[in-house]
Image (spheres, grey):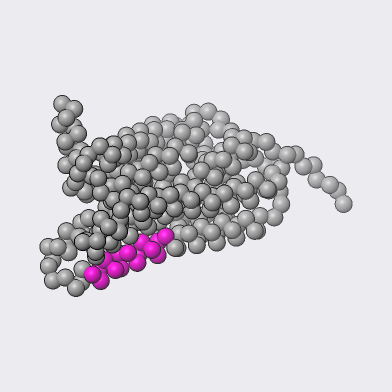
Amino acid sequence: MEIANVTSVNQFILMGLTNLPWLQKVLFVSFLFFYEINILGNLIIMFLAMRDPSLQAPMYFLLANLSFLDIWFSSVTVPKMLVGFLFDNTISVWGCIAQMHFFHFLGCAEGVLLAAMGYDRYVAICSPLRYNTIMNKTFCTQLVFTSWFIGFFSALIHSVMTSMLPFCNFNKVRHFFCNVKPVIKLACSSTFINEITVATLSGFLSTCTFSLTFLSYLFIIIHLSKIHSSQRSLKAFSTCSSHLTVVSLFYGTAMCTYLGPSSDVSIEKDKVAAVLFTVITPTLNPIIYTLRNKEVRKSLKKMFQSLQ
């Protein structure tokens, strides 16, 4: 039996979104614009939440942490993608695994944090008199650290399992960053366990966090259905609308990416979904919360007036 000529791979080539030079330039300008808006918008949200006394509530503490995650979540992938539009986009194997780790770490932490924000809205609407007691500073800090803890160790499973795979001969990643599914397809050994782990772990975490968020709003709807004041119900839902919009964007794209089969067609679809939740969604989050939240709008207006 002839032994195949196996060459160990020490770097990967990220294939990006397109090979068309003119489209690469258009995407570079577009994504650079979105990335700058993302950084600026989320920094403003963080600044307002820390400096404005009217925003010293648990809801805005969690929102500031969401903005912090959004900045780093995009920064893990977008700068490298922008470089790839202009130059050959190579990355070392360990650099690829590190990018994969931080991408899953921050993405999972954001999912858990969104569930915590759903619980915050449940307490604020269903138990307003106990809101400050339940959602105290210590508990909110624990929620944030829990999201980071779960995100870190779930990502660690993916990165450790991927680092144990042998990579030989093939080094072209069919993506614009080191996402776990296209990377493990390059391994020259069976990846069945890896694929099952990705689907199971991602599915479990997505289902749990989404279910917790869904339950929070289900209890909110049940509570409001017992109230005969339509004005109060509308006011309560208006405080939830921003969070619901962000949750829909986040889970809609994430579930499409990680719960589907790993095939050539699915990887191409994953690229589109990945653009949405790495470039578009983090940019829209601060805009959504600014436009749909009266307190944030007031704080933003005061900030601009103070600068004049």
Q: Which one is in front, 264 or 253?
A: 253
x%, y% of residue 185?
63, 50
Q: Residue at x 28, y 47 (%)?
A: 60
Residue at the extreme top = 308
Q: In this orientation, does residue 56 appear? A: yes
Please identify the quarter of the rendering in which residue 69 is found: top left
x%, y% of residue 267?
53, 51
Chief secondary structure of the magenta portion: helix
Residue at the extreme bottom = 226
Q: Residue at x 53, y 28 (%)?
A: 87
In reply to whether residue 211 is colored magenta, the answer given is: yes
Q: Residue at x 84, y 47 (%)?
A: 3
x%, y% of residue 96?
58, 40
Q: Which one is in front, 21 or 157?
A: 157
Q: In this orientation, does residue 147 appear? A: no
In reply to whether residue 220 is colored magenta, the answer given is: yes
Please identify the quarter of the rendering in which residue 30 is found: top left
Q: Which one is in front, 90 or 243?
A: 243
The quadrant of the rendering that contains the C terminus is top left
Q: Residue at x 17, y 37 (%)?
A: 301
Q: How many marks?
A: 0
**Which residues are drawn in magenta?**
209-223
x%, y% of residue 215?
35, 67
Residue at the extreme right = 1
